[in-house]
Amino acid sequence: MVKGWTALGTVLALALCGCSDSNSNGSCVPATCAAECQAAGYTVGSCVEGTCRCSGTTDAGADADADDDGAVREDSTATDEGGSGHYCAEASYIWISNTAEGTLSKVCTLDGIEVGRYWTSPQMGAGDPSRTSVNLHGDMVVTNRDPTSGPSSVTKFAAEPGGCVDRNGDHLIQTSTGPTDVRPWGEDECMIWNTPLGAGGAIGARATAWDGTEDPDTGAGGFVWIGALSNGIVYKLDGETGAVVDQTHVTNQPYGGAIDTRGNFWIVGAFCTIGICNLAKVNTADLSVEYVNVPCGYGISVDAHGRIWTSGRTLAGSCVNRHDPTTGTNQTYTDSRMAAFFRGIAVDDRGSVWVANTQGDVLQVDEESVELVHTITGLAPADVIGVAVDFQHQIWAVSQGGNMAVRINPETYAYEQFPIGSGPYTYSDMTGYQLRTVIEIF
């Protein structure tokens, strides 16, 4: 995992540290906490109410993290939490598209602090960002769906300064320090590339997934797969350069996508919400395409056994479906409430599947029986669109109606709300947990 980092000569008081310093019951281990904080460039690490907190002056005149290749962050406005002074141990982030304002929020999953906000396309406020996908190294792409001017596009951001690019040659990394610091398009040096798709106009690019072939330590290599609703084209992008290196075509109007254990790109179609649900399986090796029918679809995820999970609404209500490609069988949980609308879905690899309900709920479904276990109600205003699992096994829900992200304890169902940008809509693999679980290296 990429280490945390700090800036030159900055005094940081009580910066939150991470979770790898805790034992199995969540308490802080003092020796581990001190070692982690010192490795990150702080002078002191101590346990405060069970949480590791870093403090003290970083090494003046030297980069606090040797893994950053000499790059350090501009730090004129550092604070103890958030912005350039914030240390998110284990580099655990959730990346959420703020569709209504054309930005992307980068949130530390350890404490819910938004550590960066970025324009996602040259259209800035009109960019219409939607799906995000995180690779094994923690870097991510965001797909700009239907900009009001200009083309659909995909943009890559580096998670840590070591992967950012010093474009102006000042030996500093100029990047967002938090939600009030959105740099002009092209000036944020953690934005790596932007690739327009199609022939100049919006093509409804939606389904988005990294394929897990990149190096998890360096981030080198790997490909990004994008499905466009309007023209049915599936694009293969080079993860390093953003160049479109190949493409194929599907007929189910791509809406969401996920990579399975064998590297196939599964795409859920746009018409699933009216009961005509078709999944396309794109073989990423030879670009051949197969189709299967499932009872419902909107959100899509994959478990470690290679089974495809979808959630959505049909004419008879909402449902969660598990499709087994090996046997060709479906197993379904059905909810007949017509007001319900199941959206994003995520598998936690601990026996549960989590589903966002637009009414403001999150459902827990048993992975083996496909039966309802629990419904967490009232955790946000209406329009809960997305759900994800982080690397501490906490569950995150994205509320479009509440302009917030909600972190849920899967054991107690207690939750915390964190404000983000306007109109968040993401319901893809926004932490990278699903990819890491599926390819069985986590």
Image: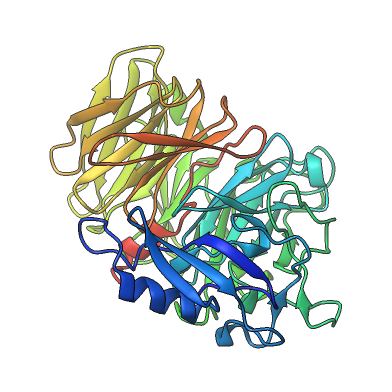
The spot of residue 344 in percent (x, y) is 43, 37
Residue at 41 percent across and 12 percent down: it is 339
Q: Which is more toward the observer, 58 or 118?
A: 58
- Judged from this view, the residue extending furthest toward the left is 369
Say whether residue 323 is visible.
Answer: yes
Q: Is residue 295 above or below residue 341?
A: below
Residue at 57 percent across and 24 percent down: it is 401
Residue at 50 percent across and 47 percent down: it is 112
Colour mapping used in the image: rainbow
The spot of residue 116 in percent (x, y) is 66, 55
The spot of residue 88 in percent (x, y) is 51, 63
Q: Is residue 72 above or below residue 396?
A: below
Total count of labels: 0
Instruction: Give the side of residue 427 with respect to residue 345, left or right.
Output: right
Q: Which is more toward the observer, 326 or 183?
A: 183
Instruction: Give the side of residue 436 with respect to residue 368, left or right.
Output: right
Quadrant (top left/top right/bottom left/bottom right) for the C terminus: bottom left
Q: Quadrant of residue 403?
A: top right
Q: Which is more toward the observer, 40 or 136?
A: 40
Instruction: Give the side of residue 319 with respect to residue 341, left or right.
Output: left
Instruction: Give the side of residue 185 with respect to residue 160, left or right.
Output: right
Residue at 55 percent across and 34 percent down: it is 404
Say whether residue 247 is visible.
Answer: no
Q: Is residue 295 above or below residue 352?
A: above
Quadrant (top left/top right/bottom left/bottom right) for the N terminus: bottom left
Q: Which is more toward the observer, 227 or 97?
A: 97
